[in-house]
Amino acid sequence: MKLWGSIKQQAGKAAFEAEKMVRIRREEGAISSLRAQIDAQTMALGKNVLNLMEEGALEHPALEPFVQQVAQFREEITAIEAKIALIKAEEFSGDIPPEGAEPTEPAPPPAAPTESVPPSTVEGTPPPMPDEGAPPPEARPAEDIAADKAADAPPTEE
């Protein structure tokens, strides 16, 4: 009879642990849903702030580099769209290139972002805010940034 009681107790414990995991997963699902809602609200907030800044209804020096970067990205999109329109307008001429002629070069890949790009978002979270009163790194003169990098560089042997 003792063996049966031990088996029953182990089965009860296993059922309890399984039910506990189900409840944990349910609560984790609720957290995940709330995080998705936060991400959606953060995105909407960012779009509204961007629109207000572009309209001149809102000004803040810490946000200006982000607005400038968005404007630069939009300009790049416009330029790429113009290239696409030119490519679409090309027509086959029917001419066969002479033997040994080099094929035309494919278009180069898009340029990589520069150092002036604000910190990218990770899983939809906004970049960290700069220290109060400190200018964003993008607003610092290039000489200051170069001097900081030179100071951090290891000494060279001459």
Image: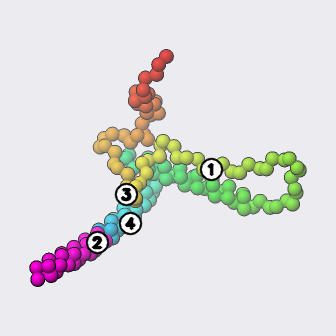
33 versus 74 height, above or below: below
* C-alpha gap between disc 4 and disc 3: 10 Å
Q: Residue 109 carries which label?
A: 1
Q: What element carries label 1?
A: loop
The three-letter code of the residue at mark 1 reads Pro
59 versus 115 height, above or below: below
Q: In this view, does 93 lie to the left or right of 30?
A: right
The residue beneath circle 2 is 25
Q: Residues within 10 Å of mark 2 (few under 14, many from 20)?
A: few
Q: Residue 125 carries which label?
A: 3
Can you tell which of label 4 and label 3 is closer to the viewer?
3
Can you tell which of label 3 and label 2 is closer to the viewer?
2
Q: Name the N-terminal-most of marks 2 and 4.
A: 2
* C-alpha gap between disc 2 and disc 4: 22 Å
Q: How is the image coloured?
A: rainbow
Q: Which mark is residue 40?
A: 4
Residue contact at pointers 4 and 3, CB within 8 angstroms: no
Q: Name the N-terminal-most of marks 2 and 1.
A: 2
**In which quadrant of the rendered view does residue 29 lie?**
bottom left
Q: Which mark is residue 157?
A: none
* C-alpha gap between disc 2 and disc 1: 44 Å
Q: Is residue 158 left or right of residue 14?
A: right
